[in-house]
């Protein structure tokens, strides 16, 4: 993997994330096995997003024994990475990022 390309991709994600407002509902309870069952999730087995397109990725987090969702992308060799550049093994679903709210 080209380190400079990864660095540019990471910097692009960081720059884009500065325009995103994220709120966390501290009262929300994760429901194992159900995080990816609703919405417009696209199975990885059906198709992949465009290379380096920022998407939401849903995968099974073995360490925490539950489904997880993160911001990420597919790299040129069809490997999945989260927004920190770490590889994600065997994601199940993905979806395009939503458009920001109209002002």
Image: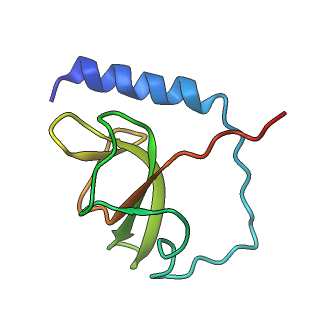
Give the camera-side residue of 12 and 37.
Answer: 37
Kindly indicate the quadrant of the structure image that contains residue 100.
top right
> Horizontal placement of 74 versus 58: left or right?
left
Q: Position of residue 37 (x, y in %)?
A: 49, 76
Give the camera-side residue of 92 and 102.
Answer: 102
Locate the N terminus and report the quarter of the image it occupies: top left
State the residue at coordinates (47%, 54%). Answer: 70
Give the camera-side residue of 44 and 85.
Answer: 44
Locate the C terminus and report the quarter of the image it occupies: top right
State the residue at coordinates (29%, 26%). Answer: 6
> Horizontal placement of 29 versus 71: left or right?
right
Kindly indicate the quadrant of the structure image that contains residue 5.
top left
Q: Position of residue 57 (x, y in %)?
A: 41, 55
**Does 4 appear above or below 96?**
above
- Outermost residue toward the right? 103
State the residue at coordinates (55%, 67%). Answer: 39
Give the camera-side residue of 43 and 92.
Answer: 43
Q: Position of residue 48 (x, y in %)?
A: 28, 49
State the residue at coordinates (70%, 73%). Answer: 28
Kindly indicate the quadrant of the structure image that contains residue 67.
bottom left
């Amino acid at each position: 993997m080209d380190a400079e390309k990864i660095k540019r991709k990471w910097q692009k994600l960081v720059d884009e994330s500065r325009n995103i407002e994220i709120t966390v509902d501290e009262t929300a309870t994760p429901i194992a096995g159900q995080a990816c069952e609703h919405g417009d999730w696209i199975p990885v087995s059906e198709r992949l997003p465009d290379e380096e397109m920022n998407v939401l990725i849903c995968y099974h987090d073995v360490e925490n024994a539950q489904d997880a969702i993160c911001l990420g992308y597919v790299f040129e060799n069809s490997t999945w990475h989260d927004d920190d550049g770490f590889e994600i093994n065997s994601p199940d679903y993905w979806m395009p990022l939503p458009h920001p709210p109209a002002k």
